[in-house]
Amino acid sequence: MIQEEKTELTEKTELTAGEKVKELQKELTWSFPNIAKEAPSQKEEAFEYCEAYKAFLDCAKTEREFTQAAVKLLNEAGYAPFEKGRDYKAGDKVYYVNRKKSLIMTTFGQREIGAGVRLNVAHIDSPRLDLKPNPMYEKAEMAFFKTHYYGGIRKYQWAAIPLAMHGVVVKKDGEITDIRIGEEEGDPVFCVTDLLPHLAADQNERKLKDGIKGEELNVIIGSLPFSADEDIKEPVKLLALSVLNEKYGMTEKDFIRAEIEIVPAFKAVDVGLDRSMVGAYGQDDRVCAYTALTAEMASIEPEYTTVTVLADKEEIGSVGNTGLDSDFVLHYIEDLAETAGIDYRTILRNSICLSSDVNAAYDPTFSQVYEERNACYINKGCVLTKYTGSRGKGGSNDASAETMAKIVDMMDREGVYWQIGELGAVDVGGGGTVAMYVAGMDVDVVDLGVPILSMHSPFELASKLDIYNTYKAFCAFYK
């Protein structure tokens, strides 16, 4: 009897010890949950949010179009153009447009601006094909555009897909005309041709990166002659030009005064039988730009003044006066400081910034390029990226422990689903963001954005739950 009691007591003790181990494991270890499993109620909210997001993507395929569409929303939300020297109070909302291709928005906070600002920076340019300055030519009785690709593209992905023509032309008389062909029902589209497999034996021997070469990214725009008159030189090119002239008043010389981009003609759509993902062109980085824009508009009398920046030229190094490697953001901060009678350096040193850019979601088809423990995954929330760069963190900002702690605390307090991520395995490759340029202004900064599948392709994929939690993260940051 005594022995039986001892055995029973031992079993209870061991059970209790096992429970303690499980509790200890739960307390000390960590894994990022799948949102759909842990918070299934978010699905309806995320799906609803992404309907407006998809519609916005369809009307904002270039940096100019994004800026124009964003300003329309800002005006409807009560924002007004920023006026240097004007006295603003908490809750006032302003915006500043830089050369029609980048944008800054602010909601003034309850604290005085010397306490720092909540700076959020995304980019609104995406990889694409730009027309060369003298793009039109005819060969073999077909008319073409010559292009120069913009940003890091995989050139073979741009052949044999429907393409649209977007841009702006400044004509001789100074009139500025917007161009948009290939998006409306009934519009013609354009195409880069590729070889049929029967004749591609030599092409098949090329390395994948040269499957289609840069000078082979020629966009076919027509095949009919202007007339049957044999004396007319390049009659197919002439007919194409006459169509542009009739529609937009353009001549061939006007291409020199134009910025015209060739982008995929795809619409933003749901992907998967469960409709859980958004498939679209340009989600790098318009997914972060749109979530930042809508979170900014939702901010009402925040504690700290917000400065939301949507910049250009990130895909080619943030160059030029609309990119972050210029002083346009610094000058805006200086104007805010001057208006408030405060040294702008004080504002910058007390500020914190989110460099809002996407990261590469783990793709099990190509698992060898990821380090699984530190990759980001779809449906696990926005991704906090401590450092980008390549190999030995070259070209990285590498956020401090203190900065990471602040952002994690903000998200945890507001119930945001987030995860960490690297841009691939250490020696595989890498990439950069605008974080290093913001850090160069003496501001604490860390990258945060959406995990993306097929990044930089003409058709990128993002989880609706991740998009929605990125929006929630920005709301928490502004709060």
Image (tube, rainbow, N blue to C red):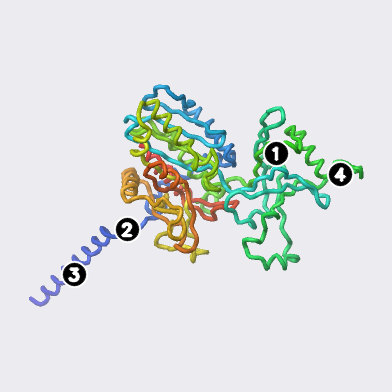
Please give the residue where the numbered disc 3 appears in the rendered image: 14
Quarter holding the N terminus is bottom left
The amino acid type of the residue labelled 4 equals Lys
Please give the residue where the numbered disc 1 appears in the rendered image: 256
Please give the residue where the numbered disc 2 appears in the rendered image: 30
Please state which of the two labelled residues, at mark 1 or mark 4, is closer to the viewer.
Answer: 1
Query: What whole-number distance in Å separates the C-alpha atoms at marks 3 and 2?
Result: 25 Å
In the structure shown, which secondary structural element does the residue marked by tag 3 occupy? helix
In the structure shown, which secondary structural element does the residue marked by tag 4 occupy? loop
* Residue found farthest to the left: 2
Residue 108 is labelled as none
Label 1 neighbour load within 10 Å: few <14, some 14-19, many 20+: some
- Closer to us: 439 or 140: 439
Query: What whole-number distance in Å separates the C-alpha atoms at marks 3 and 4?
Result: 93 Å
Query: In this rendering, is residue 74 above or below 198?
Result: above
Quarter-of-image position of residue 321: top right
